[in-house]
């Protein structure tokens, strides 16, 4: 089941889904992906009941987010549910929900659980947690990104429609990029942080993960409420700005790293080419100042704010922290940084901010969200260096009072998503949306295509798909309502027909193919094959190979093999 806000709303509207069916779907998917370590606490039936009961008394669609399920990073309070910040000994049960959570619930959204995270939001990798390392949505061995790891993966796997995270150094953007979703970081103070365990309170932001830009905008419309009780609150309206004066790109190629370095470089060059062909007002700039600002967050006096926010707890129970987390946060108290150092850093940041804000007047800056990725084992072997690299292009953002959005732009290679971040100065989220939506559509104007035979990954006609710009995504199964035949052709190929009463689940590969290439691909298909709708095991529909019925009269029924791969391995 697809879980975008519009998909869920449509199912409610047409009676295809009830609130309780939605809740059962969330529970089933959470159980299915239990090994991903996404959750710290899933609500029980008793805990979810008040939210469902309240909505059942109101008309479907009567509230902006009626019945939309969402997840909450476990450093954000939900009334009556423990907040741990991924530190069990720190756990407390809040009487009230965080201000942003309250706004979402008032709008009809349903909180379904608290998600796993890097402890005390200190990390960009998703492995610094006693609740199990969060696995990437696409490749288990890769990091999920942090610190909002569980929230990002919950959205990527269609367990919830959206999820809240937080962002101090990139935690609302890096996990989005690594899991092929949108990560929206609003202007500082536009969303309230009241009811959130602080990291660096003066620059913390609550963020949201969604599958598309439209959903992020809709959540922002509910969450962007001035909170007079939050000391860093700012009344920043959302302005739907569409005019882009300039698009800035790094003048020098960004640093790329990790096992997929070359693939990231290739993808980044494709992104630049796409931007250059889409826009005429592109300019390349020196990003040295951004790197300087980024270094201040962890190498300068700002890291002391992390200690200040948790001082009462750390003075008594610092030993309960993960060693790497303790070293970062408690190390700040030991560093020889003076008030003079702090003010010097503040003044230098003010200079950089003034320059960057002037440059970004009615303009946006585009950078890779991350320059690569790592396996979880690689992070475990070198937790500090790998984590630092993940923040190369994100750490400057909040210190310079920028708003940002990660938009997915496809895959660097199989199972390795890549995202770019669109930056603009505070209060210009509309510019980010204008650019982000355009480029995401350009780079991700793909549709899923189900193949069963010679176009499977590793088979003889795979090259046809690659030549058309298609990207392999995954191997899955159909719903149990199809039969497969070995057609009497040269070479032999499978024919799939629908047989609801006597069908079976068949293995198929899913490829993402550019929409404009579907016609070209269809021209390559010989009789009796064509394209039609295929239903997957989880109920989704997509375009895939179908066979005209007349061809099966002289064909061999090979359904028992469950797919062409196994048939060719055993019978051919």
Image (tube, rainbow, N blue to C red):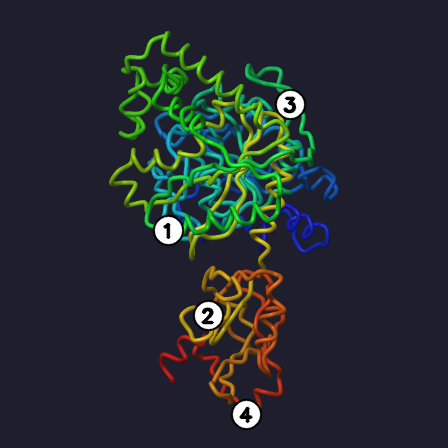
The residue carrying pointer 2 sits among few (fewer than 14), some (14 to 19) or many (20 or more) residues within 10 Å by Cα, namely some
The residue carrying pointer 3 sits among few (fewer than 14), some (14 to 19) or many (20 or more) residues within 10 Å by Cα, namely some
Instruction: Give the number of the disc on residue 554.
Output: 4
Q: Helix, strand, or loop for circle 3?
A: loop
Residue 280 relative to residue 268: left or right: right
Q: Is residue 245 above or below residue 558?
A: above
Instruction: Give the number of the disc on residue 345.
Output: none
Q: Earlier in the sequence, mark 3 or mark 1?
A: 3
Instruction: Give the number of the disc on residue 463.
Output: 2
Q: Earlier in the sequence, mark 2 or mark 3?
A: 3
- Mark nearer the viewer, 2 or 4: 2
User: Where's the N terminus, which quadrant?
Assistant: bottom right
- Mark nearer the viewer, 2 or 3: 2
| Residue 499 makes an appearance in the image | no
| Residue 247 makes an appearance in the image | yes
The residue nearer to you, when weighing 151 against 187, is 187
Identify the residue under disc 3.
Answer: 236
Task: Give the percent coordinates (x, y) of residue 216.
Answer: 61, 39
The residue carrying pointer 1 sits among few (fewer than 14), some (14 to 19) or many (20 or more) residues within 10 Å by Cα, namely some
Q: In percent of the image, x 51 and y 38: which residue is there?
A: 249
Identify the residue under disc 1.
Answer: 262
Count of labels shown? 4
């Amino acid at each position: 089941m697809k879980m975008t806000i519009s998909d869920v709303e449509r199912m409610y509207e047409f009676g295809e889904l009830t609130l309780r069916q939605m809740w059962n779907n969330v529970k089933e998917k959470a159980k299915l992906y239990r090994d991903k370590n996404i959750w710290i606490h899933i609500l029980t039936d008793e805990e979810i009941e008040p939210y469902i009961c309240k909505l059942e008394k109101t008309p479907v669609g009567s509230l902006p987010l009626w019945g939309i399920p969402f997840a909450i990073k476990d450093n954000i309070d939900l009334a009556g549910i423990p907040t741990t910040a991924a530190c069990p000994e720190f756990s407390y049960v809040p009487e009230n929900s965080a201000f942003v959570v309250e706004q979402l619930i008032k709008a009809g959204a349903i909180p379904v659980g608290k998600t796993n995270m890097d402890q005390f939001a200190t990390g960009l990798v998703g492995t610094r947690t006693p609740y199990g390392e969060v696995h990437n949505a696409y490749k288990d061995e890769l990091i999920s990104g942090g610190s909002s790891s569980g929230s990002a993966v919950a959205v990527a796997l269609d367990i919830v429609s959206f999820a809240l995270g937080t962002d101090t150094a990139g935690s609302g953007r890096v996990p989005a990029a690594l899991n092929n979703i949108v990560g929206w970081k609003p202007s500082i103070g536009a969303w309230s942080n009241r009811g959130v365990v602080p990291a660096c309170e003066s620059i913390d932001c609550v963020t949201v993960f969604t599958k598309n830009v439209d959903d992020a905008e809709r959540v922002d419309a509910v969450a962007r409420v001035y909170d007079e009780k939050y000391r860093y609150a700012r009344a920043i309206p959302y302005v739907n700005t569409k005019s882009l004066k300039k698009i800035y790109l790094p003048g020098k190629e960004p640093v790329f790293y990790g096992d997929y370095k070359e693939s990231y470089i290739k993808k980044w060059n494709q992104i630049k080419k796409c931007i250059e062909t889409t826009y005429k007002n592109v300019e390349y700039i020196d990003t040295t100042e951004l790197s300087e600002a980024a270094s201040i967050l962890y190498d300068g006096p700002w890291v002391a704010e992390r200690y200040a926010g948790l001082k009462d707890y750390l003075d008594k129970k610092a030993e309960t922290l993960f060693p790497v987390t303790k070293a970062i946060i408690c190390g700040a108290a030991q560093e020889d940084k003076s008030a003079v150092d702090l003010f010097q850093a503040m003044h230098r940041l003010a200079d950089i901010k003034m320059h960057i804000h002037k440059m970004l007047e009615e303009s946006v800056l585009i950078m890779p969200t991350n320059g690569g990725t790592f396996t979880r084992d690689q992070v475990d072997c070198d937790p500090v260096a790998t984590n630092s690299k993940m923040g190369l292009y994100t750490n400057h953002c909040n210190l310079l009072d920028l708003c940002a959005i990660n938009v997915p732009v496809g895959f660097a290679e199989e199972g390795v998503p890549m995202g770019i971040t669109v930056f603009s100065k505070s209060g210009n989220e509309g510019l980010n949306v204008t650019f982000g939506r355009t480029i995401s559509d350009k780079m991700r104007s793909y549709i899923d295509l189900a193949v069963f035979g010679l176009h499977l990954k590793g088979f003889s006609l795979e090259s046809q798909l690659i030549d058309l710009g298609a990207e392999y995504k995954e191997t899955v199964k159909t719903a149990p309502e199809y039969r497969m035949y070995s057609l009497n052709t040269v070479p032999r190929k499978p024919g799939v027909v629908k047989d609801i009463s006597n069908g079976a689940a068949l293995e198929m590969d899913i490829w993402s193919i550019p929409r404009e290439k579907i016609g070209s691909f269809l021209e390559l298909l010989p009789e009796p094959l064509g394209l039609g709708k295929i239903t997957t095991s989880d109920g989704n529909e997509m375009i895939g190979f179908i066979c005209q019925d007349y061809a099966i009269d002289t064909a061999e029924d090979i359904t028992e093999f469950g797919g062409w791969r196994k048939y060719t391995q055993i019978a051919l």
